[in-house]
């Protein structure tokens, strides 16, 4: 029973960690994530009371296949309705993560409820199946509502309302279809279908997150002056933060791991700054715009502090192995974190080295031409 309880809690939280890890810009607030977890707990107890009341009226069967999914998805999404107007909700990627957190907390308590009703012999099998199916379904369904609310906040025209309706409908239909599959299919087949639906829901959420990251990358290009294309020879387009560590490996080798982490944090702040500025531009209400402006100012202050921690010597070294900040390389690397194409680390440094050598050669040639012109001018004045 103890092992089953650990599984009931740990597996949903591991999937939440994976979903949050997909947000390479880390624009979402950890504090808000905890609030969503707490909201999921509250939604569970509310749903338990309401489902008990409704089930006594319409019957258990109808409750499970129709009413409970609708009630639970509404309750789980209440925190998202509140957060969507807050500056911490910068895009639908945040909505997906916050929604998944609320659904995960709901699912963990539901797992523990079923565990309390199970016998010792069947507890582990029951909870393992629920952790890989029902828990993921709850998280994915709430994440779909969060995605829809994010589209509602920043969308334009009638598609804003349509996206919200479709998001809520998708969450409820996923939940309804899941419950019906469990009740209609026999034994092991229902378990397989439930696991596939749970994992499929996570896959859909992950696909939306990757789409959102590509959208955010375009935001960075627009807001931070990255309109020109970045060739494969000049930058590594990265999907995971682990690959950014490859790009910054020379910094760690020369200055130590702490300095490398500081430079990495600096890049992430640059990316978050661009996202917040774009969100500020797209927000219509005055109060959220002011709050986002305050966050932008705070990010700038934090970036200045990190720049000082990195130090002049280390920053100079970084600029010597990368293109100058005026291009700006910090923003470029921040923007490439969510790209689709991949390039190996060494080719980046080779391309950059060739570019620097070329620029040095051009500058040397200009200086030679200026010296020659100066010499000729001097000779001409002396002859006269």
Image (tube, helix red, strand yellow):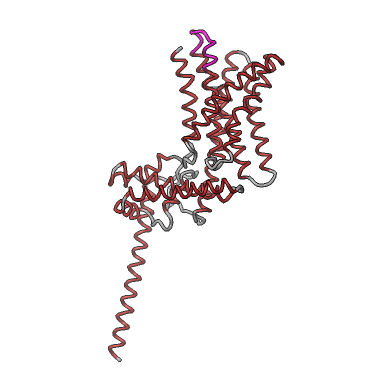
User: Where is residue 208 drawn, in percent x and y?
Assistant: 56, 37
Q: Residue at x 43, y 50 (%)?
A: 300
- Viewer-side residue, 292 vs 195: 292
Q: Nearer the viewer, residue 112 or 52?
A: 52
| Residue interval drawn in magenta | 112-123
**Residue 56 to residue 334: above or below:** above
Name the side, left or right, on which 237 lies relative to 320.
Answer: right
- Apparent side of residue 332 relative to residue 135 in the rendered image (left or right): left
Image location (x, y in percent) of residue 147: 59, 37
Q: Quadrant of residue 2?
A: top left
Q: Position of residue 279 (x, y in %)?
A: 55, 47
- Where residue 261 sits in the image (x, y, percent)? 35, 42
Quarter in which the C terminus is drawn: bottom left
Along the line of sight, which residue is nearer the eye, 30 or 100? 30
Indicate the quadrant where residue 110 lies.
Answer: top right
| Residue for point 67% across, 31% down | 169
Q: Is residue 100 above or below residue 277?
A: above
> In the image, is residue 118 part of the stretch drawn in magenta?
yes
How many numbered circles are shown? 0
Left or right: residue 357 compared with residue 23: left
Q: Residue furthest bottom?
A: 384
Occupied quadrant, residue 319 = bottom left
Q: Is residue 306 magenta?
A: no
Task: Determine whether 259 is above or below 59 in the image.
Answer: below
Q: Is residue 303 above or below residue 136?
A: below
């Amino acid at each position: 029973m103890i092992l089953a309880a650990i599984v009931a809690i740990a597996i949903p939280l591991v999937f939440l960690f994976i979903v949050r890890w997909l947000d390479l810009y880390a624009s979402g607030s950890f504090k808000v994530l905890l609030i969503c977890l707490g909201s999921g707990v509250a939604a569970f107890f509310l749903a338990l009371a309401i489902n008990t009341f409704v089930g006594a009226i319409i019957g258990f069967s109808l409750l499970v296949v129709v009413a409970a999914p609708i009630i639970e998805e509404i309750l789980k999404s209440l925190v998202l309705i509140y957060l969507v107007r807050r500056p911490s909700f910068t895009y639908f990627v945040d909505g997906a993560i916050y929604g998944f957190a609320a659904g995960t907390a709901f699912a963990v308590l539901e797992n523990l409820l079923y565990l309390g009703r199970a016998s010792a012999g069947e507890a582990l099998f029951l909870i393992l199946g629920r952790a890989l199916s029902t828990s993921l379904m709850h998280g994915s369904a709430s994440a779909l509502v969060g995605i829809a609310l994010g589209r509602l906040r920043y969308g334009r025209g009638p598609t804003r309302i349509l996206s919200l309706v479709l998001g809520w409908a998708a969450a409820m239909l996923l939940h309804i279809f899941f419950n019906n599959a469990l009740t209609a299919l026999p034994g092991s087949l229902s378990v397989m279908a439930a696991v596939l639906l749970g994992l499929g829901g996570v896959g859909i959420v992950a696909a939306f997150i990757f789409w959102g990251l590509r959208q955010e990358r375009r935001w960075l290009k627009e807001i931070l002056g990255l309109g020109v294309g970045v060739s494969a020879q000049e930058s590594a387009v990265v999907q995971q933060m682990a690959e950014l560590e490859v790009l910054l490996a020379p910094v760690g080798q020369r200055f130590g791991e702490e300095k490398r982490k500081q430079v990495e944090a600096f890049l992430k702040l640059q990316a978050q700054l661009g996202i917040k500025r774009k969100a500020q531009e797209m927000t219509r209400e005055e109060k959220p715009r002011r709050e986002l402006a305050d966050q932008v100012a705070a990010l700038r202050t934090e970036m200045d502090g990190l720049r000082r921690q990195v130090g002049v010597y280390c920053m100079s070294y970084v600029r010597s192995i990368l293109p100058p900040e005026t291009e700006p390389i910090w923003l470029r690397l921040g923007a490439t974190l969510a790209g689709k194409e991949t390039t190996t680390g060494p080719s980046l440094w080779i391309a950059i080295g060739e570019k620097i050598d070329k620029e040095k050669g051009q500058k040397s040639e200009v200086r030679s031409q200026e010296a020659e012109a100066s010499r000729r001018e001097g000779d001409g004045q002396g002859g006269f």
